[in-house]
Amino acid sequence: MVPLSLILTVSYGAATLAHVLLTVLILANWRRHPLTWLLLLAGMAGLAWAGSGLVGWSWFGIRGLPEFLGIARDLAWCLFLQRLILYLGADGPGRLPALLRWLPGLSAGLALAGLLLLGSGTFPLPPEVLGRLVPVAQLALALAGILLVENMVLNCPPDFRWAAKYFAIGLGGLFLYDFLLYADAALFVRVSTELALARGAVAALALAVIGVAVARSAGWAPRIHVSRRIAFYSMSFLVAGCYLLVMAAAGFYARRVGGDWGDFLGVLVLFCAIGLFAVLAASGRARAVARRFLAEHFYSHRHDYRQEWRRFIDALSQDGDRADLGERVIRAIAGIFEVPEGGLWLRTPYGVSLAASWNISRWRLDGAAMQLPPDDALVARLERERALHDLTKLGEAERPDWLAQVRRAWIAVPLVHRDALVGFAVLGTPRVPTRLTEEDRQLLLLLGRQAGSYLAERTLGEELAEVRRFAAFSRRVTYATHDLKNVAAQLSLLLDNARRCKDDPAFIADMLETVRHAVDRADVLLRRIGGGLDGNGAPEPAAVADALRQAVRRAGGGGRGVRLAGSVEAMVRVDVAEFTAALDHLLANAVEAAGPRGSIVVLGRRQETAVVIEVQDDGAGMSPEFLRDGLFRPFRSGKPGGYGIGVFEVRDFAHRAGGRLEVESRPGQGTTMRLVLPADGASDHPLKQAAGLD
């Protein structure tokens, strides 16, 4: 006599295998199927039911689990049929009768509630009543399924009957058998062992017919889209579930046949199975194999272009990533084919050099690979053809010497910007052996162009920053040269006066002070040229009266007709070194404009919340055209040998200090330079607000 356990294993093993094959078939037709998610739900619910029946009528102490999962399976198929009828009907939801809307859910809820009450030992009703209520509710669920199948057949449009008839045969068979099973259980208040054992085999036969319907429904108009990520995780959960079911069955078998060692062997098998599953789940190669299998067998295109493009752009534009742009380019391109390593070579004025790398410690590159000559064979081919190159197929004559050391090199991707080769990326061997298709080549060339544009823009940005640094250095040198001219003029004036006043003690003291100032000024200029000072130091209070007296003394005092006609006891908050240089520039320009016999008047006064410093000379003056077009432009001067920098530098200082520089001049009537600065403590002065320094 055949043992019942063997019949159960064969019956529900066939049902488990049939559900696995149906789930794979559903995923294979995913993109072209409008109801795939409900089909997948029903298939996975049936897989769980068949698996629980395969390993036994109890599962980790939960008795009656197959009954729970059987109700869930029938309810999932009812939901699929409801949605299918609404999809096929020309008149919308009105084609589905009200009874068929709520009967499946109500009967399934009653059946589940009855099973829970029976399992918990709580009997709000007599046990005999509950014993009849559960099969009656299951009988109602099966009847709802039969009515839904009938409604689908009656309302099916002619163009869908080719596939609908197999849905009707398969699902009708499932529900008719369940109707027979639960009618017998309701009549005799027990479940027939023979009918329950054969239920798995009947389900396997019915699923074979349903599989034909699924295959024939591939022409349905697509109304839903499931991303590859969801499909990947669904397939992963499916595989993991099947794996754990098989391992659990193996552990159960080991306990049953192992005798005294049964419990030990069962625990050992389960532990090894879980450990092996954890290792596979953490393996990058295993994930790569799964993604490649999914892309090649379940989708018409190998790549999800929307997802790949978003991932690529996000990788290149992540400013918060500590990795260099070159490394991000390698990782973004390599990630498409699950490549774990790569290198990036960029063109420079001196050749082609390795600019970035990622996990290439095994490549063992030498100095020749770090800096390639401009006439390198691979670079020349990429420049000429602008196409992908499979480095594994290069002959010995075509393979450069430096590339011969890179045993793991796979393909070279050209990086192009505006039809010019910016560089190229070399990708290592992928985790999964991959044969490049035309689709792969076009995608890689497109990504290479985008990456080439990013890298070219970065190079241009670096060159622009370098040009700006040189411009800033040149500006500092220009200012310093002009200031050194003023220092040299002060020392020259000092020597001229020394011949006449060398015996005057007051002159000697004044000469020493002037020399000390010249030395300090020269030291400041040298540090500014070297970058030690950027010309915009921290502001600090400065006494206007003291600054004017010292500036007049440095300009030559009475020897050159410089006279301090009035001062003001006020403070300004400025960069003291720049303030001193600005006064020296104004006085030097006035002295040069007035000549040996001219006179210069310096005046300081208070005007509301501002301090006004005026320098007046009786020189030749300037024309309106020069005031408008040339005075504040660098390198344009109205004096022979002038640099045209002084007034430009003074106006720049006044603007940064929150003030302004005013000029009044007429030909033959001299010039007045008026430096207006906010007094210390007048932070809300309109001058600062206008300069945008508040």
Image (cartoon, rainbow, N blue to C red):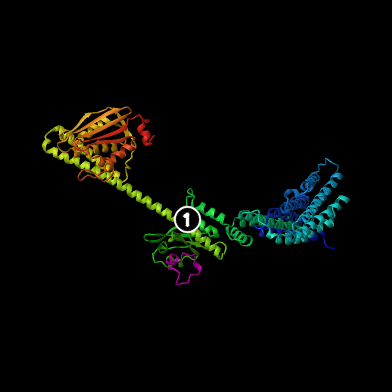
Instruction: Quadrant for residue 109, please give it.
Output: top right
Image coords of residue 270 (percent x, y): 69, 55
> Which residues are drawn in magenta?
380-402
Q: How many marks are shown on the rendered structure?
A: 1
The front one of 644 and 680 is: 644
In the picture, measured across the screen, residue 356 lies left or right of residue 92, that is left
Image coords of residue 454 (percent x, y): 45, 54
The front one of 387 and 343 is: 387
Verify whether residue 385 appears in magenta.
yes
Instruction: Quadrant for residue 174, please give it.
Output: bottom right
Identify the residue position indicated by label 1 in the image: 327
Image coords of residue 8 (percent x, y): 79, 59
Name the residue: 33% across, 40% down.
536
- Would residue 360 be seen by someone viewing this image from the given angle? no
Instruction: Quadrant for residue 679, please give it.
Output: top left
Verify whether residue 354 appears in magenta.
no
In the picture, measured across the screen, residue 387 lies left or right of residue 691, that is right
Q: Dot 1, how many residues are within 10 Å of its Cα: few (below 14), some (14-19), or many (20+)?
A: many
Q: Given the current orientation, which residue lies at the most extreme right position?
A: 188
Locate the N terminus by quadrant: bottom right
In the picture, measured across the screen, residue 217 lies left or right of residue 557, that is right
Q: Inspect the image, locate mark 1, and give the three-letter code of the amino acid beneath it.
A: Glu
